[in-house]
Structure formats: structure tokens, C-alpha cells
Image (cartoon, coloured by chain):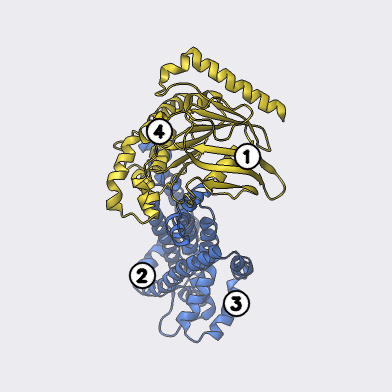
Chain colours: A yellow, B blue
Amino acid sequence: MRDIAEFQTVDILHAASSPHPNPLPHAGEGTAASAPLITLDGVGKVFRGGVAALDGIDLTIGSGTFVSLLGPSGCGKSTLLRIIAGLLAPSTGARRWADGGTGHGSIGFVFQEPTLMPWASVADNIYLPLRLSGVARRAAAPRIEAAIAAVGLDGFAGAYPRELSGGMKMRVSIARALITRPHLLLLDEPFAALDEITRLKLNEDLLRLWQNEKWTVVFVTHSVFESVFLADRVVVMTPRPGRIAADLAIDLPYPRETALRTTAEYGLQCRAVSQSLAAAMAVA
Amino acid sequence: MRAQSLAKLLAPLAVGLLFLAAWEAVVRIEAIPRYILPGPLLVAETLWTDGPSLLGSLLVTLRITFAALIAAALLGGAIALLFARSRVLEISLFPYAVILQVTPIVAIAPLIIIWVQNTFLALLLCAWIVAFFPVVSNTTLGLNSADRNLAELFRLYGASRWQALWQLRLPSALPYFLGGLRISGGLALIGAVVAEFVAGTGGAETGLAFRILESGYRLQIPRMFAALVLLSFTGVAIYGALSLLSWLLLRRWHESALPRED
């Protein structure tokens, strides 16, 4: 855990294009294909009581990519994310780190709710992952400060969660996820409960952080517009049991700014993704 | 806002004064003898003259009450931790905690007083049996109420069971524990008084409950009332002190300690 700080991701954004490692029926031209970070092999999940949530998921997530999992409510997106995180064991198939390791401690997770400890200040909430791995508070202080600054919460280190707005709480949650400098950042519909204005702002801030930090991101959403704006790869899922219906590359250059939302290219990409989603819904 | 909080203070005070005035008036007009019903002025006077000796008895009762309350907090908390630790223990023991709670203490106090030689210990045990349950049931509930997602986060970061207990489950349980303690405070006093009633005189030291009994036998009804008044003030003070403790511990973060926006 302590050596995560030293971890360096490959600069994938500028890496040469190579064929997609795991082509799928609708797979687009790979824009940011890169060294795989984690691979799911025929992953399925059946819950106790016989509910099939996922079926035959083959997915390779490239290092440094921004992957969006898009699908209707209840299609098993969150289940898939939990399996990637290692919080849930798949019923069939396997999850493998490309480097053969366990990936322990190298994952950041952001839930749909801010999921903060109400009894702890902003700084202490962000400190939690480091505290659990035995980093002393004093040693962690500069990193906590940096994380607070990175999500734009300067001056709120001593505030308690109840004193913050919904958007600010989400920022704390993101800062907590990035304090360990994770290889892999998993976000489970993190902005779904926020108002539109706050959501757009957080989208842009998240993209900026991603470009600075070069994490690998898997972002679960049910919004076509959000997934196209953020991701360089959108994986469309079918309703329960969730299968991968389409795997689309989003061919829009980074950095992506507010102005992108009104361009024709953005509109075209959104239409393509919408059509894939509609097709996925029709299959079921 | 300030006028409102003033009204909140004055309204119950006015009701109380009206009631006392009516009581005094009825006693005087009907010329009710003092051994049937003393007026509030006489009770106040008795409280003043008998105060020192009653306070001594109150101290005896308070010692049992506080010892029982502390035992309820410590042992109750420990039992709740055991329950939270092991589901098997919880299922097998919780029904007996309920049985202890619902069995009237007046019925078992004589047995306890026969079995336990030391009077103080016997009274303490009775008061504890009455007081411990709210702490156990509330704290168990609190320990099991930790946010599921936070628990997953702890797992993701490889937290040990010990870390999860100290940093997640105990803070989550704190408001529940304090809520239980507030109920237990009043119950400990009731338990102590009931036990004293059953035990009778405890040798040289007599608690307030026995003074009430004794005053009743001797038809010193004003003193009986004075002791009663002292007892209820004590109960209110215990509740107030525990509420203050709860507020002090929770005011930074818990909903219950926030000022209402109305």
C-alpha cells in the first residue's frame, strides 16, 4: 500500500494505437488501446435466490483509459463494478490483474452516495484510507492537503460533512478515493443524485484530475451524455442479466471542455451511443 | 425566536404554578388534615426543615443509582459488543436479556436480597437488572447500523476487524448507546428505589425509599411528600445530565444534536 505513491502509470494517452485486445461485435476503432490493467474472463454472477445479474462478461480494461459502463437501471453495472473492485466474487469466470498481483490497496472507489463518516471532519474522512494502512497523521498531512486542493475544497478541511452541500460531499468522496494514488478508480454513478449544474461541473473537474493523474477509470452511469463526455470508451450493457452489448470508442480529443457539449461531433457520438443502447434494450 | 423560547420556558412554569395554587387552595378551603394531604407550602417547609436528614438518605440512594448506571453502561456496552461480534451469542442470549427486562423487579428483589449477603451489592444488582437492557438493545442496534457502503470501503482498504470496530462500528453506535443510557438513568433510580422498598432498612444507612415508607407508617405525610419531591428532582437532574453528555459528544456531527430550523 505504501509503495502506491511511487507507482507510475504508462503515459497511455500518447501511446501508439494498437488493435483492441478483446474485440467485440460492435467494438469501435481503439483510440487509446494500451497495456491491459485488469481482465474479466467470462464473468457471471448469480445471487442467492437465483437472480442472474451478469452473464459472460469479457472485458479488458487498458491502463490509463477512461471506461464508462452504460446501461439501464438494474442491468448489473454496479455488480460488475464491485466484482472489478474485488468486493464481490464472481459466480463464474475470473478477474485477473495483468501484472499477476492482487491489486490490493490500489483501488479507489466512489459510491453513488458520498458515504462519508459523519463524525469525522473533511480532512479525517480523506485521511481514512491512509489511516487504515498505518500512515501516521502527520506524515499524511501534505497529501491530505493536496487532495483537498485537487478537488477544490480549500478552507474546508475542518468542516463536518453535515455542513457541506451534496456536491461538496461528493468532492470529499473523490478526494478520499484519490489520496492513495490508485491505479484504478471505480465510480458507481457518483453524480446521479446531484443537480444538473453541479454534475456538469464535477464532470469537468473529474476529467481534469484524470488527465493530470493518469489513473485508469471505470465510471458507471445511466446517462448517455455523461458517458460520451467523459469516457474514451463506452461499454453498453443489456438489461438483466447484464451482458456487453456494444463496446464503442469515443473519438473526441482531450482536453474536453464545456464547449464540446454543443459541437456536432459530440452530438454524433451521443447518437451512436444512444442507438447502441436502444439496440441493447431491444435485445432483451 | 427568542420570544418563542421564552414561551417554551414560561408555559410549563405557569401550568405548574397554577396547579400548586389550586392544590393549596383546595387544602385550605376544605381544611384537609395534613396527615391526609398536606399543601405545597407545608411540603416546602418540611423540605427545608427535614432537608439535611433527607439529603443524607438521598446520597445513599444516589450511590446505588450511579453504581447501577455505570455498571449498566459498562456491562451493557460489553454485552452489546459480544452480541455484535457473534451472531450465535446474540441469538442464544438475547431472549434471556428480554426475560430479565420484563420480569417485574419487585417480584425477584426479595430473592436477590436473600441470596446476596451484602446489602449494597443486592440493591445494586436489582437496580442494574432494571437499568441494563436499554443500553444492550440500543447499542446492539447501533453496532449493526454502520453504513454498508462505508463497511465495504473499509474492506477495500484492507481494514482489520479491530479497525472496523473502532473506527466505524463504535462511532456509529455512539448515538444509540447514549440514547439507551438516557433511558437507563431514570430506570437505575427506579430500580434503586424499588430495591430499597423491598429490602427495608439497610442497617445504619437508609435510602430515600425507606424514608418514604417510614414516613408513611408514621403518618408524617408532609415528609413523605418532601422525600418524593426530592426523588423526582433527582430523576430530572439525572436525565438532564445525561442529555447534556449526549449533546456534548454529538453536537459536532449528529442530527439529534442540531438546532431545529423552525
On the image, numbered disc 1 is attached to which residue?
Answer: A57
On the image, numbered disc 2 is attached to which residue?
Answer: B51
- Look at label 2 and name its amino acid: Gly
Residue closest to the far top: A264
Q: Chain of mark 1?
A: A
Q: Nearer the viewer, mark 1 or mark 2?
A: 1
Q: Nearer the viewer, mark 3 or mark 4?
A: 4
Q: Nearer the viewer, mark 4 or mark 2?
A: 4
Q: Residues within 10 Å of mark 4 (few under 14, many from 20)?
A: some
Mark found first going from the N terminus, 4 or 1: 1
Q: Nearer the viewer, mark 1 or mark 3?
A: 1
On the image, numbered disc 4 is attached to which residue?
Answer: A210
Asked whether, in this view, residue B123 is left or right of residue A235, the answer is left
Q: Residues within 10 Å of mark 1 (few under 14, many from 20)?
A: many
Q: Residue A205 at what x, y percent from top left?
A: 39, 29
Badge 3 element:
helix
Mark 4 touching mark 1, by CB under 8 A? no
Please state which of residues A8 and B200 is positioned toward the viewer in this rendering. Answer: A8
On the image, numbered disc 3 is attached to which residue?
Answer: B108
Badge 4 element:
helix
Asked if badge 4 and badge 2 are on a common chain, one would say: no
Q: Residue A209 at what x, y percent from top left?
A: 38, 33
Residue B218 appears in the rendering? no
Residue A160: name its quadrant: top left
Please state which of residues B182 and A272 is positioned toward the viewer in this rendering. Answer: A272
Asked whether, in this view, residue B72 is left or right of residue A9, the answer is right
- Look at label 4 and name its amino acid: Trp
Badge 1 element:
strand
Q: Residue B57 at what x, y percent from top left?
A: 40, 75
